[in-house]
Amino acid sequence: MANTHVFTHLDQIFILLRDWLVGFLPGAARPAAGVVLGVIAIVCLFPGLFALTTVFERKGLGRIQNRLGPNRVGPFGLFQPIADGIKSLTKEDVVPLSANAGVHFLAPLVLVVAVFMGFAVLPMGRNMVLVDMDAGLLFFFAMGAATELSVFMAGWSSRNKYSLLGAMRAVAQMISYEVVLLLSAVAVVMIAGSLSLPKIVDAQNQYTGIFPHWYIFTPWGLAGFVMYAIAATAETNRSPFDLPEGESELVAGYHTEYSGFKFALFFLGEYLAMFSISGLGTTLFLGGWSAPFSFLAFIPSWIWFFSKVMLSIFVFIWMRGTLPRLRQDQLMNFAWKFVLPFTLLNLFVTALWRFMGEGWLRWVVCSAILAVAWVLMTRVGMREEHFGPRRYRYAE
């Protein structure tokens, strides 16, 4: 009993700390103070993770490319983010004379604020959600849509053709893959029967023996997770979908005319979006804060959530150091002619899974439909659409 009591306190340590702090205030002020403390925690935590991730990514890419990575500032280069931050703060902020100064200034702020708003509905542990709303999933995607507006604001306000072209490419890419992102989440809503993210986690926080009921361990859940991961990579402009920032074509894309701290805000927003979208994928398909095995449920729930998120970040870094960048036509064809049709088919398979009832038959039927569709679309459809490797032709 004593051990159980200790584990419960560790699991709820941040909730207990918040309640202790607001306990010094009058009763009427406590709800608002609790929200303020939650906001402060999010605003401090994720930029801190961003700073550490930049070091891990540069060291990881260095290892992949057989070099050391940052190793000069601090022990093992761990103080490199501090040096980068000082450089961004002190670097001159250059704004083109022809730019729309107001919109140019607001664009990075809109991006960062919109991404931070998405963290408000993510359950980061048991009872650890800032705003528990019934339509939390809709709120998350609504905030995500605002990032596309900020990207277009940056490109248009710069009065630079490279920036405008980069913004248009980015918006086209983000809208195309956001459709897939939404539809892959719809499959989870169909099974869980709720748009509330804590309820979606609760639906997966069950076990058969020692094994969890995570949605990724079902045929439709695995297919939905793969489509979600592809769309999330494109939404966050990560390699191999980092075309909005194609240096050989667009200099730096939509933020070509940004420098100093404004550029740092775009950099911060991109990494925060990566954390946010990884957190949503963890919530929808990987059981959120639930343990991977029933006998590990004593470990604090927030440790499991952040472990899964950081594992997703590691995969993002691994792909960046491994995969080459796609062409623009390949990226758009892949979205509309493969990923979207397969996601729509997965919704049909999810409905079959939902209404066929318990038993092995639905496993066979749903798995067979998805496997056949995957083979046909990859082996036949992609060849006919010329999605394959690049062909170089030279003048004779």
Image (cartoon, rainbow, N blue to C red):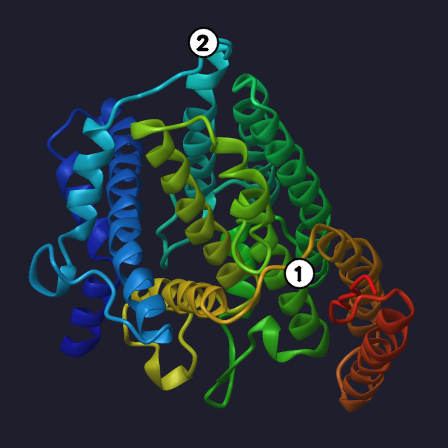
Image quarter where the N terminus lies is: bottom left
Q: Which percent across, then down, holds residue 343?
A: 77, 62
The kind of residue on which mark 2 rests is Leu
Quadrant containing the C terminus is bottom right
- From the viewer's perspective, is residue 33 above or below residue 237? above
| Mark 1 neighbour class, 10 Å CA radius: few under 14, some 14 to 19, many 20 or more | many
**Residue visible at 76% across and 85% down?**
363
Q: Disc number at residue 188?
A: 1
- Decide which of 306, 13 is in the foreground and name it: 306
Q: Name the front one of labels 1 and 2.
A: 2
Q: Secondary structure at mark 2?
A: loop
Label 1 secondary element: helix
User: Which residue is painted at 77% across and 90% down in the image?
Assistant: 360
Horizontal side of 133 relative to 343 (left or right) equals left
Task: Describe residue 128's horizontal placement relative to residue 155 as left or right.
Answer: left
User: Which residue occupies the extreme front position in the image?
Assistant: 396
Sequence-first disc among 1 and 2? 2
Measure how far apart labels 1 and 2 are at the Cα level: 49 Å
Residue count near mark 2 (Cα–Cα under 10 Å), binned few <14, some 14–19, many ≥20? few
Toward the left, the furthest residue is 75
Instruction: Indicate the amino acid at tag 1.
Output: Val
Q: Is residue 68 left or right of residue 285?
A: left
Q: Which mark is residue 97?
A: 2
Q: Position of residue 380 (x, y in %)?
A: 90, 77
